[in-house]
Amino acid sequence: MASLFSTRSLTARLLSLLPSGRSDGGRRALTSSHLSPSHEAAAVEEVNKGIADLYDEMTVVMETLWGDHMHHGFYDVGVPTRSLPDHQTAQIRMIEEALRFAGVSDDPSKKPKRILDVGCGIGGSSLYLAKKYGAKCHGINLSPFQIQRAQSLAMSAGLTDKVSFEIADAQNQPFPDGHFDLVWVLETAEHMPEKSKFIGELARVTAPGGIVIITSWCQRDLLPSEVSLRPDEVSLLNKLSESHHLPKWCSPSEYVKLAESSSFKDIKTADWTEHVAPHWNVAMRPVLTWKGITFILRSGWKMAKGLLAMPIVSEGREKKIIKYAILTFRKPE
């Protein structure tokens, strides 16, 4: 069936069904300088629980509509929408483009042998990378439902000897130092309450000579004359924080500084905002039907509110408030 509504029209219709939420996006507790260490820990735990609950609820819908790769696709800039590949093809291309950008070798003697997939979703990237490199892949995230589903997909693919999954906090990982040749972080860093602690933990578990790849929605870099974002920009980011449990935004340049402070080398970054911009026009096609709308409304308010935030993402991208960045760096030998 053809699309019944435009994205904005659908948003207007469904917003009337949704309860209003907090305007601070759950960020106030984490950004206050007056919190005691115990209260900060409690705030982080609250955020983690919110993330786990969100993805427990959203996963069935996301997998049904979009498959086992729960990240954006990579598209050529300037191609008409009607000529774009399907979103699943673009999602695989995102993986390959990220590997190419980071210079991950296909040479049998140099390719990664142990891979960590941080924020692994239902294991799509882990399964793909395990097959591509013949590597041992370990995925972690906070959602029990997603971990269970990832384990099931690994079994169906006959890859349980190569791929494993467990519930774990990316800021306190249960792995020995220097264990992974490749650390893979697609669209997960956004959820980290303490970005410096997160990057430090990536540095700890990465093996000497190992590569880290991060793709993340970021706030824009500040201009030399600025000390902060404008109030209207902060307001827009807070709306996204509320719907997607994004506790603290970070700019690409801030990520670079954190990588440098963790002694990473060969730091590279690029703005891929325009390469992912078509994703929601393509991925929303199965949603904008009576079947898709009914499915979403039956799946819970968190899923509906998450999808309804997509026009805010588009607004932030068009106003250049948010950027989709890729960052890669290497741990010294």
Image (cartoon, rainbow, N blue to C red):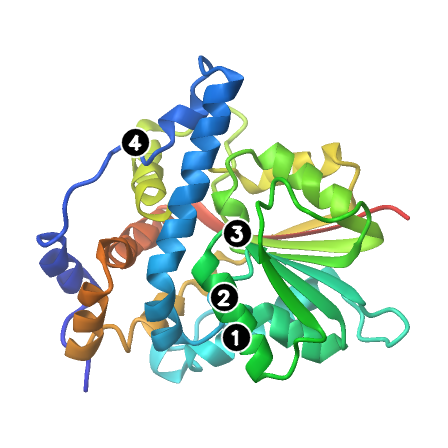
| Between marks 1 and 3 in the image, the one whose residue lies nearer the viewer | 1
Where residue 329 appears, x then y in whole percent?
A: 74, 50
Distance from the alpha carbon under mark 1 to that under mark 4: 37 Å
Distance from the alpha carbon under mark 1 to that under mark 3: 22 Å
Residue position marked by numbered label 4 in the rendering: 24
Residue position marked by numbered label 1 in the rendering: 152
Where residue 128 appears, x then y in whole percent?
A: 62, 76
Type of amino acid under label 2: Gln
> Viewed as shown, does residue 243 lie left or right of 162?
left
N-term mark: 2 or 4: 4
Q: Secondary structure at mark 1?
A: helix
Image-quadrant location for residue 93: bottom right
Where residue 62 appears, x then y in whole percent?
A: 37, 68
Label 1 near label 2: C-beta < 8 Å? yes
Type of amino acid under label 1: Ser
Q: Secondary structure at mark 4?
A: loop
Label 4 near label 1: C-beta < 8 Å? no
Q: Mark on residue 188? A: 3
